[in-house]
Image: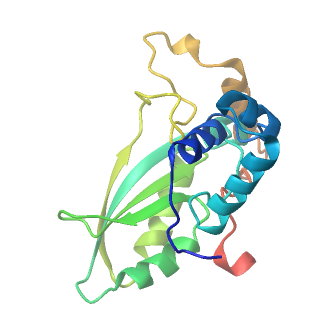
Amino acid sequence: MSTKSAPFDELDRKIVVALIENGRASFAEIGSAIGLSPTAVKRRVDRLRETNVITGFSATVRPAALGWLTEAYVEVYCDSAAPPRRLAEVVRNHPEIAAAMTVTGGADALLHVRATDVEHFEEVLERIRTEPFIRKTISYMVLSHLLPDSPEAGARRPSDDRSATRPEDRAAHQAAGRAGDGARVHPQPLRRAANQR
């Protein structure tokens, strides 16, 4: 795929917005909304994909529906000799890490971690801390999402009423806790670990 920049006009912007709002919209539906033929929309989408403006299509799923009921952000502090690519290798091996980025400020990196429960989160944190170049971590547990419709939002929405939790989220939480004989139930990974590819 080419990474060369191509002109990006108002029609391209409208196509991208339409696909963000509904990734399953047909070229005919998009064309009808913005005044282009389905063929013209397809041609533009193909160009946007080729130039990496559009990098893929995916489904947005509530993490709680998959059993991911605990969420945290973790600041990672590394030894000065640890290059970012080394940290990238480590985080690829932890399917519970939904996102990872280097940051400015005191920390070297910030991880977005999802887990089935606090115990599972603690296990993930301990695995991360075993890396010899990681000096320390500081965790921030997510209590609620102030923008519940954002892609990063998990199962929890701000509410004064604890009973307002969606029934399907309660069912997922109860199912995750029913392992029997002390076994742990872990949902499918958010993504595959590097060694599973």
Q: How is the image coloured?
A: rainbow
| Picture layout, residue 152 above or below residue 159 | below
Q: Residue at x 39, y 65 (%)?
A: 101
Residue occupying image coordinates x 76% and y 51%: 42
Residue 120 lies left or right of residue 77; in this view the side is right
In the image, what residue occupies the spot 69% across and 28% down? Answer: 33
Can residue 131 be seen here? The reply is no
Quadrant of the rendered image containing residue 66: top right
The answer to whether 144 is drawn above or below residue 60 in the figure is: above
In the figure, residue 34 lies in which quadrant?
top right
How far from the left and from the top, in percent, is residue 168?
A: 72, 24
Image quadrant holding the N terminus, namely: bottom right
Determine if residue 156 is in view: yes
- Count the numbered circles shown: 0
Residue 138, percent across and down?
30, 57
For the C terminus, give its image quadrant: bottom right
| Left or right: 21 in relation to 23 | left
Name the spot of residue 121 as percent of width and height, x first. Answer: 51, 53
Using the rendered view, name the quadrant where residue 17 is placed: top right
Q: Is residue 125 above or below residue 12?
A: below
- Outermost residue toward the left in this view: 106
Residue at the location (54% across, 50% down)? 114
Pick out the residue farthest to the bottom: 81
x and y percentages locating residue 143 in the rendered image: 41, 32
Q: Front-most of 11 and 23?
A: 11
